[in-house]
Image (cartoon, rainbow, N blue to C red):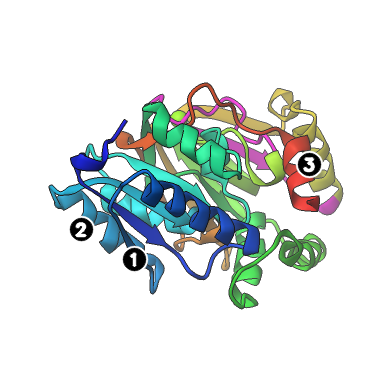
Amino acid sequence: MIQPGDGYLQYIINPKSGSSSNKLLVAEFKDYLLRAGYEVRTHFTESLHHACELATAGCRDRDCALIAAAGGDGTIREAMHGLAGNAKPLLIIPSGTENLLANELGFGLKTDSLIRAFEGDCIRPLDLGRINGRHFTSIAGFGFDGTVVRIVTENRKGHISHLDYFWPIWQTFWGHKFPRFQITIDGKEEFDGHGMIFVGNISRYAIGLQILHNAQFGDGLLDVCIYRCRGKMHLMRHTAMTIFKRHTKRSDVIYRQCRRVRVRSTSPVVNTEIDGDPGPRLPVQIDVIPHAVNVLVPPGAKPAGMRTRMMRILD
Ligand SMILES: [Mg+2]
């Protein structure tokens, strides 16, 4: 465990993310650190890129013992981008809407879960994905969810809640035309057809859907799930099968583990997302950077399941 004499803590906070309960978590954990005698240097981010710069500054400063980043998946992704290749650990303070990565690493949304991670000394190496040169931590989506994320982002005013996804999903469900993709996995042409694609490093996506259910965040591999899909009924069947974790057994789903993926499309407009933010234009090349960062995790914790996450949404 880091001791107060080891150096200061770089506390990076995205002031735009988080509901009031998230903000309480960020403040309570800081109080805990101060009471325990740690020097805490707080920085509020002005943009996502600023989170990256602050993380880089912290990891280059010898007097900085630990970097803590409070925000949603976007803030955490940018902090990781700034830390990649450096051994200094990152502590995630989950204060976004979905907190996909924090959930995968076993964090709860209470202060005691953070304190257990901080005191537990359990440091795990985390792989990052790299998409056209930019790092991501959790998942990249192509097609349907890219469109949902684009609509949510365009209408965003400050902190978003789960409810803010409802109409964009509804609108996308009725209006979406499934693009045609060409997918190459580890150099082999695997798919040419209409559908939607997910590439990532975490087993549970939004509301706990286990799209990439074999994914492990430190195994040096990316998981890929390709759903062949052309219409609404087909999408509903895929969704039901994914809820019941039977999707990968279907002949219209391709599931692979790999090191490199190339995604192209002949469709004119394809929306993409990375970790819940709008992603790059196609074509993209995605590769994995094994053990790119170290993260502190609560010892022995497991990702919360779909039921827990639904309860959190309703809470
Ligand atoms: Mg992996």
Q: CA distance from mark 1 to mark 2?
A: 11 Å
Residue 120, located in which quarter of the rendered image? Answer: top left
Q: CA distance from mark 1 to mark 3?
A: 41 Å
Name the residue tied to disc 3.
239
Name the residue tied to disc 2.
57
Mark 3 belongs to which amino acid?
Thr
Residue stretch rendered in magenta on the structure: 209-232
Left or right position of 67 against 203: left
Q: Secondary structure at mark 2?
A: helix
Left or right position of 121 against 71: left
* Label number found at residue 258: none
Camera-side residue: 20 or 142?
A: 20
Circles 3, 2 touching at the beta carbon (< 8 Å): no
Mark 2 belongs to which amino acid?
Ala
Mark 1 belongs to which amino acid?
His
Name the residue tied to disc 1.
43
Camera-side residue: 75 or 258?
A: 75
Q: Is mark 3 within 8 Å of ligand 1?
A: no
Q: Quadrant of ligand 1?
A: top left
- Observer able to see residue 189: no
Circles 1, 2 touching at the beta carbon (< 8 Å): no
Instruction: In the rendered view, tell whether residue 224 sits above or below residue 15.
Output: above
